[in-house]
Image (cartoon, grey):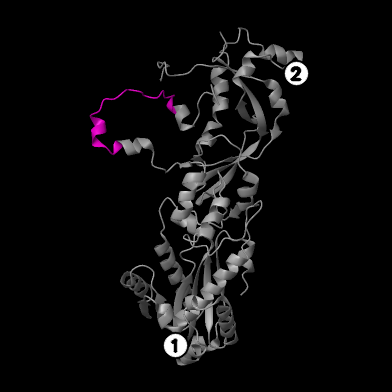
C-alpha cells in the first residue's frame, strides 16, 4: 500500500485506491464499507470499501477473510497481499482522515460530529466507486450509531442500490471483512510511519495502542503535552482524554466563540433583580473599540 | 464622547527608551483569534510554523485542534512595527542607563518632572516587524479585520494632533 502522499502531508485527508478490475465494471458487485481507528485518541481514522462481483463472492470467502479485529497484524498483511493478487476481481479504495482533520471538524464553530463525518466519508467512498464505473448492486456497512437512521441515509443517497447496514457486518459479510482488513492495514501503516509535522524533542514513539484507556497512551499524552500548543497534530484534540489532560497541564485558551462569563451570568434570571455593585468598565470611544485599540499605560 | 469620569482608570506616564528601537531585531509575528492569558515563551518554530500550509483560500494551520485561516498584513509604508515590553518598575526610579545613547536621545527621554513610583513606566522595544500574519477562526480575517482598521489610526492621530494654523 503506497501511502507516501499522506506521509508528505498528513494534515488533511488522503484517498487511495486499487485499479478497478474490468469484471467489476460489467457484473453487478457487492461492496463492503468499514472503518479502522474510530476510537483511538491518536492517529488517523481510515475508511475503506472493498468490492467484488456477486458471482465471485465465494472466491473472496475462500481467502478466509474475517473481521480484522480477530486477525493478527501479520494475518491481515497476508490477507491484504492476497487481495492484491486477486486484483482481477477484487477492488478497494480508502479514505484516510488525519487526526488534524478529525480535531478541526469536531471542534469547528459548527460542530461536525464523528458520526456525521463517518457517514459522509462512507457515502463519499461509495460514490467514488460509482464514479470509477464499478457496477455496485449491493452495499454492506458496519453500523456507526443507529443502524436504522444510517441505513435510511445511505438508501436515500443511493436509491438504486440495495443497502444493508448491520452491527457486526464485518464478521457477517466477506466484502465488509475485506474492507475492514484494508482499513486496518492502512491505519497500522500510517501510525507506524507517522511523520510528525512538529519538530519534537526526545520524541517517544512508544504510544501503546492509541486507545484512550491504554495506560501507555495516557502516559505518552502526558509526556508530550506542550503548555501553549497542547499536543502534536498526531493527537485528536477533540477527544475527552486529550481535553482533560489539556485542562490540567496546559494553559487556558479563550476563543472568540468561547462562552464568556458574562453570558453565563445572563442565564440566571435573578441576576436582573440583583442590583449588585455597579462596576461598569471604562469604555473608550467606539472608534477605538472597533479597532481593538487601548491606550498603552501598561503592557 | 466617553469622558474620563472613572476613578477606576489607572493613570500612568509612559516613557519610551528610544535606544531600544534601534536595537530591535526583526521578528515573525502571528496574531491568533484567541487569548492565552499567560506571559511565557512558546515554541512557535517547532509547533506552529512547520504546520502552516498554503491552501486555496489563504494560509492554513490549526491551533489546539481548531482550524485557522490566515493572511499576511503589511505595516503601512511610513510606519514601523515594534513589539513593546514593559520594563521593570524599579528601572524607572533607578539609574537610567542611557549612556549608550547620544546626547540628543538623553535629552529627549529626560522627563521634565521627577519620576514617581506607580506613575511612571518605562517601555522598550524587544523586536521590530514590517509585516505579520493574522489568523481567523476557520475563515480568513479579511478586509474587515480589527487590526487592519487599527492600522488606520496613526494617520488619523497625526491629523488630529497636528497644530491648526492660525489665520
Q: Is residue A107 left or right of residue B147?
A: left
* Residue A152 image offset from top left, x and y in percent: 32, 72
Please, what secondary structure does the residue beneath circle 2 have? loop
Q: Which residues are the magenta region? A: A266-286
Chain at tag 2:
B
Residue A125 percent location from the top left of the image = 48, 73
- Give whichever of A64, A97 is nearer the camera: A64
Real-space Cα separation, disc 1 to disc 2, in angstroms: 85 Å
Query: Could you say which quadrant of the image residue B113 lies in?
Result: top right
Q: Is residue A294 visible?
A: yes
Label for residue B101? 2
Residue at screen point 46% across, 82% down: A175
The mark found on residue A28 in the picture is 1
Q: Can residue A50 be seen in this snapshot? A: no
Residue drawn at 43 percent across, 66 percent down: A118
The image quadrant where one finds the N terminus of chain A is bottom right
Q: Position of residue A232 (x, y in %)?
A: 57, 53
Dot 1 falls on a residue whose secondary structure is: loop
Q: Are marks 1 and 2 on the same chain?
A: no
Q: Most extreme residue toward the front, as rendered?
A: A215
B155 sits left or right of B126 in the view: left
User: Nearer the viewer's eye, disc 1 or disc 2?
Assistant: 2
Amino acid at each position: 500500500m503506497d501511502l507516501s502522499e499522506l506521509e508528505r502531508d498528513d494534515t488533511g485527508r488522503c484517498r487511495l485506491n486499487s485499479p478497478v478490475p474490468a469484471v467489476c465494471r460489467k457484473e453487478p458487485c457487492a461492496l463492503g464499507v468499514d472503518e479502522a481507528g474510530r476510537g483511538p485518541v491518536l492517529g488517523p481514522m481510515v475508511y475503506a470499501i472493498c468490492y467484488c462481483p456477486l458471482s465471485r463472492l465465494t472466491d473472496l470467502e475462500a481467502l478466509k477473510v474475517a473481521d480484522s479485529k480477530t486477525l493478527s497484524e501479520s494475518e491481515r498483511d497476508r490477507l491484504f497481499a492476497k487481495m492484491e493478487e486477486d486484483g482481477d476481481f477484487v477492488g478497494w479504495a480508502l479514505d484516510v482522515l488525519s487526526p488534524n482533520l478529525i480535531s478541526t471538524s469536531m471542534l469547528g464553530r459548527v460542530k461536525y460530529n464523528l458520526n456525521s463525518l463517518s457517514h459522509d466519508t462512507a457515502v463519499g467512498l461509495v460514490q467514488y466507486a460509482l464514479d470509477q464505473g464499478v457496477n455496485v448492486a449491493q452495499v454492506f456497512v458496519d453500523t456507526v450509531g443507529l443502524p436504522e437512521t444510517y441505513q435510511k441515509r445511505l438508501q436515500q443517497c443511493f436509491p438504486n442500490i440495495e443497502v444493508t447496514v448491520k452491527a457486526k457486518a464485518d464478521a457477517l459479510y466477506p466484502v465488509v471483512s475485506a474492507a475492514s482488513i484494508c482499513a486496518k492495514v492502512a491505519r497500522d501503516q500510517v501510525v507506524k510511519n507517522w511523520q510528525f509535522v512538529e519538530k519534537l524533542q526526545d520524541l517517544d514513539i512508544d504510544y501503546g495502542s492509541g486507545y484512550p484507556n491504554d495506560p501507555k497512551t495516557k502516559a505518552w499524552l502526558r509526556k508530550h503535552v506542550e503548555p501553549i500548543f497542547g499536543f502534536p497534530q498526531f493527537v485528536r484534540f477533540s477527544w475527552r482524554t486529550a481535553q482533560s489532560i489539556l485542562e490540567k497541564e496546559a494553559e487556558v485558551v479563550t476563543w472568540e466563540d468561547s462562552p464568556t462569563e458574562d453570558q453565563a451570568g445572563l442565564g440566571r434570571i435573578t441576576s436582573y433583580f440583583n442590583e449588585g455593585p455597579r462596576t461598569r468598565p471604562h469604555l473608550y470611544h467606539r472608534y477605538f473599540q472597533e479597532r481593538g485599540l487601548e491606550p498603552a499605560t501598561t503592557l | 464622547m466617553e469622558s474620563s469620569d472613572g476613578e477606576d482608570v489607572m493613570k500612568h506616564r509612559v516613557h519610551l527608551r528610544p535606544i531600544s528601537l534601534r536595537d530591535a531585531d526583526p521578528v515573525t509575528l502571528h496574531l491568533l483569534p484567541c487569548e492565552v492569558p499567560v506571559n511565557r515563551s512558546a515554541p512557535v518554530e517547532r509547533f506552529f510554523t512547520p504546520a502552516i500550509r498554503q491552501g486555496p483560500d489563504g494560509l492554513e494551520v490549526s491551533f489546539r485542534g481548531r482550524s485557522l485561516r490566515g493572511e499576511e498584513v503589511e505595516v503601512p509604508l511610513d510606519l514601523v512595527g515594534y513589539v513593546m515590553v514593559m520594563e521593570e518598575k524599579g528601572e524607572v526610579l533607578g539609574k537610567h542607563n542611557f549612556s549608550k545613547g547620544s546626547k540628543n536621545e538623553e535629552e529627549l527621554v529626560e522627563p521634565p518632572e521627577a519620576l514617581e513610583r506607580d506613575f511612571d513606566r518605562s517601555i522598550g522595544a524587544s523586536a521590530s516587524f514590517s509585516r505579520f500574519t493574522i489568523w481567523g477562526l476557520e475563515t480568513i480575517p479579511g478586509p474587515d479585520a480589527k487590526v487592519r482598521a487599527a492600522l488606520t489610526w496613526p494617520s488619523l492621530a497625526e491629523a488630529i494632533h497636528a497644530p491648526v494654523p492660525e489665520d
